[in-house]
Image (spheres, coloured by chain):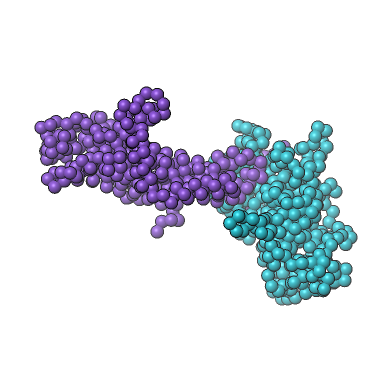
Chain colours: A purple, B cyan
Amino acid sequence: MAFHTKKTRSDDETVKAPPSRSLTRDAMRRLMKNRGAVAGGIILLLLIFAAIFADFVAPYSATEGDILNNYAAPTAAHPFGCDFMGRDVLSRLLFGARISLAAGFVGAITAFAIGVTFGLISGFFGGKTDNFMMRIVDIMYGFPTLLLIILLMVFFKSSFSVSGVAGAGLRGVLSNLDRSMGGMFFIFLGIGLTSWLGMARLVRGMTLSVRNTEYVESARAIGTSRTRILFRHILPNVLGPAIVAQALQIPGFIQYEAFLSFIGLGVNPPTPSWGMMLSQGYLAMRSHFHLVLWPALAISITLFAFNFLGDGVRDAFDPRQTR
Amino acid sequence: MAVAQSDTVLLDVKGLVKHFPVRKGSFRRVKAAVKAVDGIDLFIREGETLGLVGESGCGKTTAGRSILRLVEPTKGEIVFRSRRMAGGTAGEARLVDVVKASRSELKALRRDMQIIFQDPYSSLNPRMTVGGIVGEPLLVHRIARGEERKKRVQDVLGAVGLKPEHMKRYPHEFSGGQRQRIGIARALVLDPQLVVCDEPVSALDVSIQAQVLNLLEDLQREFGLTYLFVAHNLSVVKHISSRVAVMYLGRIVELASTERLFADPKHPYTEALVSAVPVPDPDYSVDRIILQGDVPSPVSPPPGCHFHPRCRYAVDVCAKDAPLYRDLGNEHFVACHRADELHLQPIHDQTSGQPGGAAA
């Protein structure tokens, strides 16, 4: 080829050489300056730690109680008291963090995977495909999410979780899976199936706009294949904002789990979930207020932490949006 | 007549048409068409620079992109003389119709025909490093990999005035002029024959424009490039082109060597454009021809000559028949019924060819 190395031809545009910094590192720096976000992050790290090491951190079992300690008030031995079966509330809270975080993260990952794939295909292929796929989203959007998720859970619970159904077939497999996860599996499924719609719309919109940029056009001018354009040019530019948007949805998923468990459509009884602790505690709320106080506080603090961190991350990645 | 470096015609465009359908209503039926490019003929010789000028919306950018088939042409023939696609016999060039090229042929053609974009901010992927951007063509065409690819990228970065260590940086760390150099490097790394420059300097500061134009000229000499230079700035086009084509509402109204076009414009629209070029002399006053009205919509262009509603020389026939695009001799092409009888005003001699003048 005709190129030969020659002296650079920089003219008078001064070429400074500060250490290279990527967009991500810039965003991290802005994030660390945001006190609310840092506090949220620390709380979340503690929660994640508690959830992972609940077996070692928790002083008592979460599922087995001591009948003599029914409704025990907070003492040195049981700092948060005991519930109606004499189970240690602190231990149940710590194990409950597992359920809440799992619902938040797995729900987010499921919704993200479905939403991004759907939106990317819809936006990239455009035309009739796009039209058809977006009408599906519109129709599902028209249905109230909460109602849909309740219906789904009722359907799952009634047709899959029947005791005695086991062994062969999809039904048996799903049922066993759900039971072995303490009722979590259907919560993941329910959240995933109802919560990808917003993500699909967002990703489709971004895909449409990225698809029309000049750098995608230049990739076509080079002769880049469609697959490579999709994965190397469009996806990386769509992913960042999509992750941030998805992170902002996590508290919603935690709420769904708490709500479903509260109304009895969530986890199966011995499993310690904050929502279930609330629903069991409110029956004795007048005389034993601590049974409601701690799980309610745990839920609020977790949601606060997620919201502060999520807002911080969004602002860090898009400084123009900050007030 | 400005004789180009070679007499070989590299690109021959015949009757190129690009209509964008306008769909309306619930069934999205085609109701009309935006006639962005409405039948243009032009050819470019090897090693020359053909300027393509016109107002915003006249179809010059669409024309440039149709030639690369970045937008599918509706009709027409684009014959390209490819050095690489010679079918077997070494050294022989092969004539390929870009419009009819198959997928694999088109991909091979991409090595020969490249494009430089107007906006250096949106034409570089913000998530890729400079090395990734400039090296991608080599990867896609499986030309070089690993160390060799790195070396080729560094060579071409050097050729456009950037440094090898810039490879690891991201586009947002560069100024507009530097970004445009990255875009130029990406176009050149495949060693193309033809480069479509789509307003490559109009988004840059005036002080940077001259640098980038000089760079383009240097590169043309060095690598024997042929340019189709699309622009709306007449001063820039005058500076860089050996021949100039003037477009109005999807058609070429005049095409001639740069000197002839400016010294002896044959089309009233060219005359008006030429009179709008600013002269850097405060005492000089020119009879500036101010065109009345706006450019008509390309959805329903006026009948006959597209320019007749704004033309001060228009006669009856102009509204009825579209003028023939013909050669007046010496490759001075014009599409005007009255080209032979009119004596139009040339540009003032002192006008410098410096870029940075007002837009036409």
The residue depicted at 73 percent of the width and 40 percent of the height is: B102
In this view, the residue farthest toward the top is A167
The residue depicted at 64 percent of the width and 37 percent of the height is: B140
Instruction: Say above or below: B72 vs B24.
Output: above
The residue depicted at 66 percent of the width and 45 percent of the height is: A221
The answer to whether any part of residue A191 appears in the image is: yes
The answer to whether any part of residue A79 appears in the image is: no
Q: Nearer the viewer, residue B124 or A184?
A: A184
Classify residue B108 as left or right of residue A115: right
In this view, the residue farthest toward the right is B329
Classify residue B292 as left or right of residue A40: right
Classify residue B131 as left or right of residue B300: left
In this view, the residue farthest toward the left is A68
- Residue B24: % across, % down: 61, 58
How many tags in the picture?
A: 0
Instruction: Say above or below: A199 vs A157.
Output: below
- Residue B126: % across, % down: 54, 47
The residue depicted at 83 percent of the width and 60 percent of the height is: B325
- Residue A110: % across, % down: 42, 39
- Residue B328: % across, % down: 88, 62
